[in-house]
Image (spheres, rainbow, N blue to C red):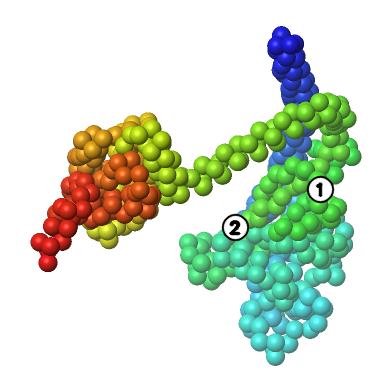
């Protein structure tokens, strides 16, 4: 029968190990297969997004660079004819992704009528309304010249300063002297897009400061980019059927409006703004094989899960028992466990006819440590004293922290002489301990000793009261000492004190 039971136990463990290996192997295989496929896919999708963003950046940067060169030409020439502007602007549109180019003049209010007469148009608001002196405008920014892949003659004369979406961008371009791009706006040539403005200053004028740049401003060279044209390089760089979004200021400017699942994103720097290109490749890894492996592993791991729950429950019960019977700060037994151990030790002493001792220990002037150095330093000192007490007690002794700076030690099978020696050794060890916290002085302890097992009529409460009385007698006697409970000696001390 014993051999059969041993064989059953052996088969049980062999079967459990086999289940564990199969479950772990199948789950690991599923994770590895899917993780590898997913990592390869994510890496490829991220590379696609970065490549598309960089290609778009390069094309846009080339157009902006050419626009900057055109601004330098306008600055040098000062007074352009429509024909001269057209030659320069059309060269900008022959390549890259510019949809239109324009020249925006800076016209003081005092020169408005003369400027309108020279150029043959009226300066009007964005809505086409005539701007009158009553509007209070002291400077206008009319679109003076424009060339686009589609006609824009009807846009000439529009005052961009009356457009709330463009005026802040014009001011930023004027003050920085660098190309500045608008948010997505309706384009004068039709459709939605963005416009880049490049400030043009008087040739030779100082432009080191914002004030100097404002004073030297002649106007702006502008370039219009339709959103659809901006994404042509993206379409060329991405595989077929790949979805993408162009996000500007956390909003979708182009592409599907709904969020993508697990997309890849790449930053796209355009003039002074940073956009985000979000890409979703539909060719995602197939999860059928990893899912099959995982289902098999999870099915076989059901037994393992049951065992783990049972083991976890037992561990939790042990943990709760530990927390209920031990002090959280020091790990020593708490007052409840101390009472159980003392009662058990007293019962054994009566049964075996032996004696034991209870030591009650209180640190001297511990309150001064808390008041001077703070409670964290006091807690650290309590932990150090607990370590000292552990080193000075036997494995059969019961060591507890009753609360605050009070400790108790139960010494079973111990006579009075042994108890006194143990108490004095503990007091000396505490006296010699050097606190680890800087500035904390060494501390002492007052120890009271009470014997149990000598008088079978003495109960738990009596022994605790006697040890407490002896401890307070040690404190009254000058602290840093040991007192054994002696009713006559304590009575004499009280009489002397009176």
Where is residue 476? Give x, y as percent: 17, 57
Q: In which quarter of the view is residue 350 placed?
A: top left
Residue nearer the viewer, 121 or 47: 47
Label 2, secondary structure: give it: loop
Determine whether, in the image, residue 414 is placed left or right of residue 177.
Answer: left
Above or below residue 89? Residue 396 is: above
Q: Residue furthest left?
A: 496
Query: Could you tell me if residue 332 is visible in this image?
Result: no
- Image coordinates of residue 437 in percent, x first then y, are 27, 46
Residue at 59 percent of width and 57 percent of height:
178
Residue at the spot x=81%, y=52% of the render?
Answer: 259
In the image, residue 346 sits, relative to residue 29, either above or below, namely below
Q: Pointer 2: what residue?
A: 178
Q: Which residue is mark 1?
A: 260
**Direction from residue 269 to residue 345 in the image, left or right:** left
Q: Residues within 10 Å of mark 1 (few under 14, many from 20)?
A: some
Q: Residue furthest top?
A: 3
């Amino acid at each position: 029968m014993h051999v059969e039971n041993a064989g059953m136990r052996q088969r049980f463990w062999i079967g459990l190990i086999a289940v564990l290996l199969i479950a772990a192997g199948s789950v690991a295989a599923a994770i590895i297969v899917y993780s590898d496929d997913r990592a390869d896919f994510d890496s490829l999708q991220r590379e696609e997004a970065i490549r598309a963003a960089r290609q778009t950046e390069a094309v846009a940067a080339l157009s902006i660079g050419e626009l900057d060169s055109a601004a330098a030409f306008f600055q040098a020439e000062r007074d352009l004819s429509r024909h001269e502007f057209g030659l320069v602007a059309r060269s900008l549109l022959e390549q890259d992704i510019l949809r239109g180019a324009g020249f925006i003049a800076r016209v003081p209010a005092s020169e408005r009528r003369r400027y309108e007469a020279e150029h043959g148009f009226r300066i009007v608001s964005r809505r086409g309304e005539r701007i009158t002196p009553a509007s209070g405008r002291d400077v206008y920014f009319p679109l003076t010249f424009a060339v686009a892949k589609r006609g824009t003659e009807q846009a000439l004369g529009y005052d961009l300063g009356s457009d709330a979406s463009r005026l802040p961008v014009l001011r930023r371009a004027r003050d920085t002297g660098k190309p500045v791009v608008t948010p997505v706006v309706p384009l004068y040539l039709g459709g939605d897009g963005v416009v880049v403005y490049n400030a043009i200053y008087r040739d030779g004028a100082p432009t080191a400061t914002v004030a100097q740049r404002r004073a030297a401003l002649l106007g702006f060279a502008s370039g219009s980019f339709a959103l659809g044209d901006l994404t042509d390089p993206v379409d060329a760089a991405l595989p077929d059927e790949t979805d993408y979004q162009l996000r500007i200021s956390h909003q979708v400017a182009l592409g599907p409006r709904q969020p993508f699942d697990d997309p890849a994103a790449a930053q796209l720097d355009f003039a002074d703004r940073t956009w985000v290109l979000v890409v979703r490749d539909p060719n995602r890894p197939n999860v059928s094989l990893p899912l099959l492996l995982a289902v098999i592993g999870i099915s076989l791991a059901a037994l393992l899960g049951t065992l783990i729950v049972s083991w976890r429950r037992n561990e939790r019960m042990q943990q709760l028992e530990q927390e209920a019977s031990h002090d959280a700060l020091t790990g020593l037994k708490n007052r409840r466990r101390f009472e159980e151990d003392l009662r058990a030790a007293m019962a054994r002493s009566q049964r075996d006819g032996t004696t034991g001792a209870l030591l009650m220990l209180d640190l001297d002037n511990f309150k001064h440590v808390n008041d001077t150095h703070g409670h964290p330093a006091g807690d650290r000192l309590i932990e150090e004293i607990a370590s000292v007490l552990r080193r000075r007690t036997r494995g059969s002794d019961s060591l507890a922290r009753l609360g605050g700076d009070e400790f108790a030690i139960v010494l079973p099978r111990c006579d009075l002489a042994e108890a006194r020696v143990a108490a004095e050794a503990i007091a000396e060890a505490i006296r010699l301990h050097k606190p680890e916290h800087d500035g904390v002085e060494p501390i002492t302890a007052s120890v009271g000793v009470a014997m149990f097992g000598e008088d079978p009529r003495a109960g738990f409460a009596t022994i605790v009261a006697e040890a407490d009385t002896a401890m307070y007698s040690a404190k009254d006697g000058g602290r840093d000492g040991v007192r054994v409970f002696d009713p006559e000696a304590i009575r004499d001390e009280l009489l002397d004190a009176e």
